Amino acid sequence: MEGVELTAESFWKGRRVLVTGHTGFKGGWLSLWLHGLGAKITGFSSEVPTKPSLFELARIGDTLNDVRGDIRDAAAMRRAVDECDPEVVFHLAARSIVREGYIEPLEFFATNVVGTATVLDACRAASGLKAIVCVTTDKCYENREWDWPYREIDALGGRDPYSGSKACVELAAAAYRSSFFSDASRPVGLATARAGNVIGGGDWASDRLLPDLVRAVQAGKPVSIRHPRATRPWQHVLEPLSGYLALAQALSAQPAKFSEAWNFGPDAGGDQPVERVVEEAARILAGRLEVRIDRGDGPHEAGRLMLDSSKARARLDWRPRLQWLEAVRLTLEWYGQFLRGGAHLRALSERQIQDYRGPEGPAAIDRSERGSS
């Protein structure tokens, strides 16, 4: 990274960190990673969003100070910030399922936009704060279904409530950054982070491809697939999380230099059609998966998405380590253990993090198939 010298271990050991949405899928994996680095973590979340959940299966509550509350509750948010006195804040709490946004649009705008503003407002009083990473999504861009990846300078937009709410989050974060966190006497780094279609063990949200496949296998029923030819930028959850960690470290060292929007997407070839991912999953699951195509009408969903992460590569020295096939296989390794009884999922999750961080990448993957598509 430009001018950032500390190793991850020396930077995070003993550092006070607040993670909103720690009971969710990405927040749970981030909390486990931070725990392994020696951080002192406070998690703030309203509830465990699914059952089963990564949070419970991997016993993430044992790794942190587990605080429950609504991010829209200004008093509760201020108390959590005051008690934690964070040096770094990762804001991940959000409503995130596209089709649910059509059913509860007001809830999506209230949680995602007002909730983000409430978190950022509480952070204004944190005396020891150095960096805030506000996680949004690749869907914050005005999607024109074009054939090249979106850059951070491209227009924001959103045809559905989820995408529109996340575009608003980007604007809210920019307003708080320029209004309250750019004081030269006490600068705080505030950046937004946009990732692609994240997969990994422990995601049990509805209307997500691999969790739906696993639920079908568990129930012994066919799985219904929408939009089989739609492409998505598939990436394992550890890929963007490594970017968030690098970004927080850079923001802490040089807030003015890194306080902007950042993409963390897969390499070229990561944008694969849904049907290709389903084919690979069915092969790994050894024929236990029956697939049906849902040809019914449904609300609009983007047909093509891809991120340009060249800025993160150039300035943060961040780059993805996994091809999409590796991401699918690591994900199904986790779910395979769950389907066999779910023992030792905390140990498996920690091992996947350690393998990912190691010099050779994940040890569980057959390197001979790296780069296959």
Image: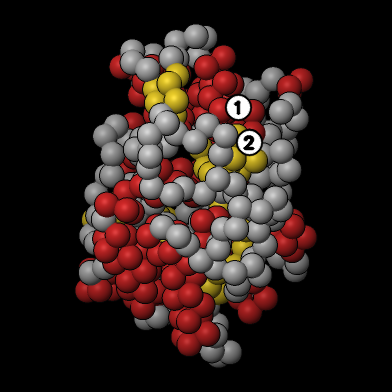
Residue most toward the top? 287
Numbered label attached to residue 276: 1
Taking 239 as reference, is 297 left or right? left
Query: Which amino acid, mark 1?
Result: Arg
Q: Residues within 10 Å of mark 2 (few under 14, many from 20)?
A: many
Numbered label attached to residue 323: none
Q: Position of residue 240 (x, y in %)?
A: 58, 49
Query: Along the line of sight, which residue is nearer the eye, 314 or 14?
Result: 314
Query: Along the line of sight, which residue is nearer the eye, 110 or 291?
Result: 291
Label 1 residue SS:
helix
Taking 70 as reference, is 274 left or right? right
**How far is the residue under mark 1 from the one under mark 2?**
7 Å
Query: Along the line of sight, which residue is nearer the eye, 173 or 167?
Result: 167
Which residue in the protein does label 2 denote?
272
Taking 357 as reference, is 129 left or right? left
> Which residue is located at x 29 percent, y 66 percent?
110
Q: Name the image quarter holding the N terminus.
A: bottom right
Relative vertical location of residue 35 with respect to residue 16 in this rendering, above or below:
above
Q: Position of residue 47 (x, y in %)?
A: 24, 49
